[in-house]
Image: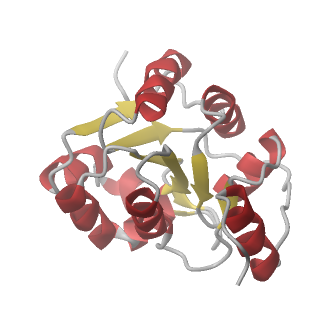
Amino acid sequence: MTAEQTPALDRRAVVRELLVRCPEALVITGLGSPSWDAFAAGDRDGTFYLWGAMGGAAAMGLGLALAQPQRSVLVITGDGEQLMGLGALATLGAQQPPNLALVVLDNGHYGETGMQRSHTSLGTDLVAVARGCGFRHAQAIRELDALAPLAAHVAARAGCILAQVHVACEDLPKALPARDGVYLKNRFRAALGLPPF
């Protein structure tokens, strides 16, 4: 069976599995579906839902990973957002924080703007891009069985990694977390043992 024929994974099941397997990770979610999926899996103080700032999840994850080197940092974003923030991959590749994992949920579409096809459905290979940016660990995931080793890599802080997870293109019910940026910031800081500001 070719990659194109491999059934795409259930996006919400992927996120739930990763979060269950990485309970201690600090989590940054990208705009839209990744935030809804993380919230649907169970809200937690160590998750920061990035409302807006499309393209910024990977860069924010990098800053967090550098500031909290003793903690695993898991960024969950979509292909559309990561395509908008391709430059961040070069910076991640140059910095290589061992505690940072970037998981791109790739359904080949821009879900927030009308489900237009994204560049990943038109030939852009994010794993190849990551490797070209210097990532030593980059992989495509098309089977649920691959999530356990990915989660183990995240928990062990075994090296900066990009995982392009091929998920089905489907419109799932929205599960909306809080949208109050000050509340989310202060909650996240408290989870890190830091005072609000």
Name the residue at 63% across, 74% down: 113
Relative horizontal placement of residue 39, taking residue 194 as reference (left or right) = right
* Residue 119 visible from this viewpoint: yes
Question: Which image quadrant for residue 11?
Answer: top right
Name the residue at 51% across, 24% down: 147
Can you give x and y, in whole percent of width and height, for residue 52 in the image? 63, 79
Name the residue at 55% across, 20% down: 144
Relative horizontal placement of residue 176, taking residue 54 as reference (left or right) = right
Q: In the picture, which quadrant includes the C terminus? A: bottom right
The correct choice, above or below, for 48 with respect to 164 in the image is below
Relative horizontal placement of residue 191, taking residue 139 as reference (left or right) = right
Which residue is more in the foreground, 88 or 60? 60
* Residue 105 visible from this viewpoint: no
Can you give x and y, in whole percent of width and height, for residue 153 in the image? 40, 28
Name the residue at 53% across, 58% down: 109
Which residue is more in the foreground, 19 or 139? 19
Which residue is more in the foreground, 62 or 114? 62
Q: In the picture, which quadrant includes the N terminus? A: top left
Can you give x and y, in whole percent of width and height, for residue 68 in the image? 46, 56
The correct choice, above or below, for 15 with respect to 77 in the image is above
Which residue lies most toward the bottom here? 197
The correct choice, above or below, for 139 with respect to 107 in the image is above
Relative horizontal placement of residue 161, taking residue 58 as reference (left or right) = left
Tally of numbered discs: 0
How is colour applied across the structure in the image?
secondary structure
Can you give x and y, in whole percent of width and height, for residue 110 in the image? 55, 64
